[in-house]
Image (cartoon, rainbow, N blue to C red):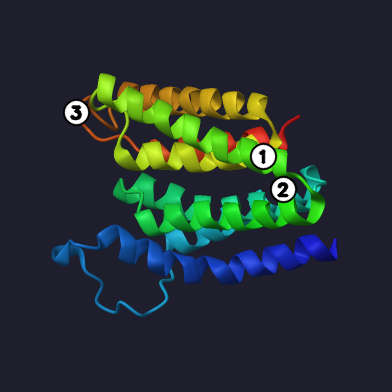
Amino acid sequence: MLVELAWSVAGIIYGPVITTPITKAAHRGEPECGLAHPNKIIISRETFTVSLVLVAGIFVLDHQLASAPLLAASSWLAVTGTQLMMTDWIHHRLPNPLVTAMLVGGLVIFSYAAAEEGRVIALLRAITAAAVVFIGGLTVAVTAPGALGAGDIKLLGTVALYLGWVGWSHVLRGVVLALFLGSVVGAVLLATRRISRDDRFAFGPAVVGGALLTLVTP
């Protein structure tokens, strides 16, 4: 109980902090959308949404994952993934610094686990999965222009690193679930006329959500 309470408090405090780099990254290169106080911590509806998602996500991870390396890595995936989900949904961007942070964090945690626990095969599988999914996404983008953006491809490859640590079945489930969630949400938005066929669609939330759901389900 104390662990869950600690995570909840941390999530509530961390929410306002991480929405600042989110907004900065999303608006970078757009002077007309610049922040009046770029160094000020942002308190808004987005702030509390991020906080609640972080609290719920890490709470579930703490209950479902027994492996210490996987719990640490998945928690980092939840933290960075929440930022990316929010940024992509609101601003239709997947900033490279956030994707890189997710990738590097996972590599550091899994490399340490491989060295300490001798799980070199799991590390190699995770890296291979990331490369395979990245190349697959790149192939789709080349053969079907407009299907996936550059940010989507990099994010798919990055989450595949986390899924690959567990196994190839998780990689397959995570990718399929991401495509399924993206298709369902896209269809609903089209049906309700929230978007048109010419609008950009935020695929990032489906990618991160699919990965986290895959990690916490048997």
Q: Could you tell me which residue is drawn at 71 percent across and 63 percent down?
A: 7
Work out which residue is located at the far right of the displayed protein and give it: 1
- According to the picture, the residue beneath numbered tag 2 turns out to be 70
State which quadrant residue 199 falls in. Answer: top left
Mark 1 lies on a secondary structure that is: helix
State which quadrant residue 136 falls in. Answer: top left
**Lower position in the chain sequence, tag 2 or tag 3:** 2
- According to the picture, the residue beneath numbered tag 1 turns out to be 165
Q: Nearer the viewer, mark 3 or mark 1?
A: 1
Q: Amino acid at mark 2?
A: Leu
Mark 3 lies on a secondary structure that is: loop
Looking at the image, residue 106 lies above or below residue 158: below
Mark carried by residue 24 = none
- According to the picture, the residue beneath numbered tag 3 turns out to be 198
Q: Amino acid at mark 3?
A: Asp
Viewer-side residue, 169 vs 135? 135
Residue 172, image x, y percentages: 58, 24
